[in-house]
Each structure stands twice: as structure tokens, then as C-alpha cells.
């Protein structure tokens, strides 16, 4: 499908991506895992640019989970450096595509210099009107919900005011639409603590492609696959006969 055909069929408003398989991609090439992360960043930029070209409103990238601290210090350090230097050095990339940066995850738990770059990138792109690219860094969905509930309690919310809406609003970004399409590369068929609340009615696509090999062509194909799904949200679709 061409870009225009894809757009004409109706796009998902919010795409979430679990970018998995960097380590295995590197291992296959006898390279250190870090080389996989570097190549993974190239894929992420390609896909974010493609999403911006199509006019996707929100794309959330699972970049570093609250569980990923369990990895070797060298790998964690490399990832933190990669995130920090990308946000600092590649601002042109965001300008070029009119991309607005946002963040979900536990900001306070990140190294201070990484926190600073995230805050700066958000501020520098806050008036951009293109695709919003949400980086999930030090993100865990359970952690996000726990922090949200704490916010509700400390603001004195009464139990009768606890609704799906108030809980949604207590999450890291209060007004983002639910994830319509969730793509996980790397062959594993699990959520690994990604947007549990926001994925309640998402369409899932699990791809065996390792993230550094994922490209625009497969991204288009996955969106096309999404367009052929029937979303029922628990209802019975109207019969034509
Ligand atoms: C995903 O790739 C990137 C992060 C979790 C940061 P992995 O590093 O998990 O790659 P595999 O799953 O080991 O191949
Ligand atoms: C999920 O991948 C986290 C990110 C892609 C950032 P993992 O590789 O950490 O997930 P598990 O450990 O296989 O569930
Ligand atoms: Mg993995």
C-alpha cells in the first residue's frame, strides 16, 4: 500500500511499540549487545519519521523498563548514555519532522543528566504540532499506576470520585488516547509491564523481526493489518441482513 492509500483507510491514533530483539540481533553478528542498541536507535528514528510522515498522532516507544535495571551495569550505562546523547545531539531530527517529545515513566529514578535532557527535549518541542513521540524510559505500567494512585490520595480524592476517568488522568500523561495498535518485535508474546491500563482494547501484532531489522515496509504492513481488524469493544456488531 502507498502512503496515501494507507492514510485513506484510517490510521490508528496511538501506536505503542515494544522494541525488542536488539541483543539477539547483535549476538547473531557476534557483536556486543550494545551494538544492537545502537542499531535499534536507527530503527526507532526510521519508524518515528515514518509515523510523522503518515500523520500518526501518538507513538509510544518502550525504551527502558523499570525491570531493565537488572541488566549488567555496562549495558545499563550504555543505554543511559545513548538516550542522553540522542536527545541532546539530534534535536534537528525532531525539528525536521515537527515531532513533539513527551515522556512516561519514573523520571526521578533516572540519572540526573538523563532527567535534564528529557525535560529539555520536552520543553524545546512543546509547540510542535506533528506526531507526539512518547518515550517510555524507566517505565513500568504497575509503577505508573501506583504513582497515580498515590497522587489521587495525596490530593484528597474521595472514594466516590475514583472513576476510570480520574485514574486515567492520574497517569503520567493525563490526556493521551488509549493505544489502538500495539506492536512487539523480537518474537516474544508478552506485554512486559507496558501500558497495561492503556492497552485494555488494543489490537496486538507480534512480529518475529528483531527490532534493528524492523523497517518502514513492515510498519506499513502492520498498519494495514490493523485496518482489517474488527474492533468490537465488547459489543455485537450490527448485522446488515
Ligand atoms: C530491547 O532489546 C531493548 C531494551 C530492552 C532496552 P533487548 O535488549 O531486550 O534484546 P533481546 O531481547 O535481548 O534480544
Ligand atoms: C521490554 O523488553 C522492554 C523494552 C523493550 C524496553 P525486555 O527484553 O526487557 O522484556 P522481557 O524481559 O523479555 O520480558
Ligand atoms: Mg528483550
Image (cartoon, rainbow, N blue to C red):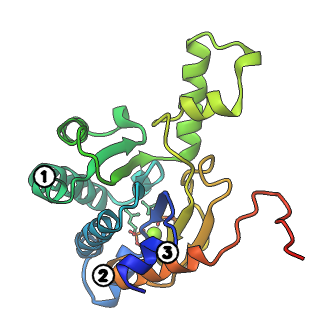
Q: CA distance from mark 3 to mark 1?
A: 27 Å
Residue 26 is labelled as 2
Q: Pinpoint residue 206: horizontal percent, then vertical percent.
A: 56, 76
Crowd tier of the residue under label 2, counting other residues whose Cα lies within 10 Å: few below 14, some 14–19, many 20 or above: many
Count how many numbered circles sit on residues in the image.
Answer: 3
Q: Pinpoint residue 239: horizontal percent, then vertical percent.
A: 87, 71
Residue at x 30% of width, y 81% of height: 26
Q: Which residue ends up furthest to the bottom in the rendered image?
A: 29
Q: Nearer the viewer, residue 39 or 135?
A: 135
Q: CA distance from mark 2 to mark 3?
A: 27 Å
Name the residue beneath numbered marker 3: 223
Residue at x 41% of width, y 76% of height: 21
Q: Quadrant of the C terminus?
A: bottom right
Name the residue beneath numbered marker 1: 91
Q: Nearer the viewer, residue 184 or 232?
A: 232
Mark 2: C-beta under 8 Å from nearest atom of ligand 1: yes
Which-is-in-front pick, marks 2 and 3? 3
Q: Is residue 154 above or below residue 45?
A: above
Q: Is residue 42 above or below residue 133?
A: below
Q: Is residue 66 above or below residue 116?
A: below
Residue at x 61% of width, y 73% of height: 189
Q: Quadrant of the N terminus?
A: bottom left
Q: Pinpoint residue 71: horizontal percent, then vertical percent.
A: 39, 59
Amino acid at each position: 500500500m502507498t502512503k496515501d492509500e494507507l492514510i485513506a483507510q484510517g490510521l490508528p491514533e496511538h501506536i505503542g511499540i515494544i522494541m525488542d530483539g536488539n541483543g539477539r540481533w547483535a549476538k547473531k553478528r557476534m557483536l556486543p549487545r550494545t551494538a544492537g542498541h545502537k542499531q535499534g536507535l536507527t530503527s526507532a528514528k526510521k519508524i518515528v519519521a515514518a509515523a510523522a510522515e503518515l500523520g500518526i498522532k501518538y507513538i509510544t516507544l518502550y525504551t527502558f523498563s523499570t525491570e531493565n535495571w537488572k541488566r549488567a551495569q555496562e549495558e545499563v550505562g550504555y543505554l543511559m548514555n545513548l538516550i542522553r546523547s540522542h536527545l541532546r545531539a539530534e534535536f534537528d531530527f525532531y525539528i525536521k519532522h515537527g515531532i513533539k517529545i513527551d515522556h512516561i515513566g519514573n523520571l526521578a529514578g533516572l540519572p540526573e543528566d538523563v532527567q535534564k535532557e528529557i525535560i529539555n527535549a520536552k520543553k524545546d518541542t512543546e509547540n510542535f504540532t506533528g506526531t507526539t513521540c512518547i518515550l517510555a524510559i524507566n517505565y513500568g505500567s504497575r509503577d505508573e499506576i501506583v504513582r497515580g494512585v498515590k497522587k489521587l490520595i495525596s490530593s484528597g480524592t474521595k472514594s466516590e470520585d475514583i472513576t476510570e476517568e480520574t485514574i486515567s488522568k492520574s497517569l503520567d500523561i493525563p490526556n493521551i488516547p488509549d493505544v489502538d495498535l500495539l506492536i512487539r518485535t523480537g518474537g516474544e508474546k508478552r506485554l512486559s509491564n507496558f501500558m497495561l491500563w492503556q492497552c485494555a482494547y488494543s489490537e496486538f501484532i507480534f512480529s518475529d523481526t528483531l527490532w534493528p531489522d524492523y523497517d518502514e515496509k513492515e510498519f506499513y504492513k502492520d498498519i494495514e493489518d490493523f485496518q482489517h481488524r474488527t474492533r468490537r469493544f465488547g459489543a455485537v456488531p450490527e448485522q446488515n441482513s
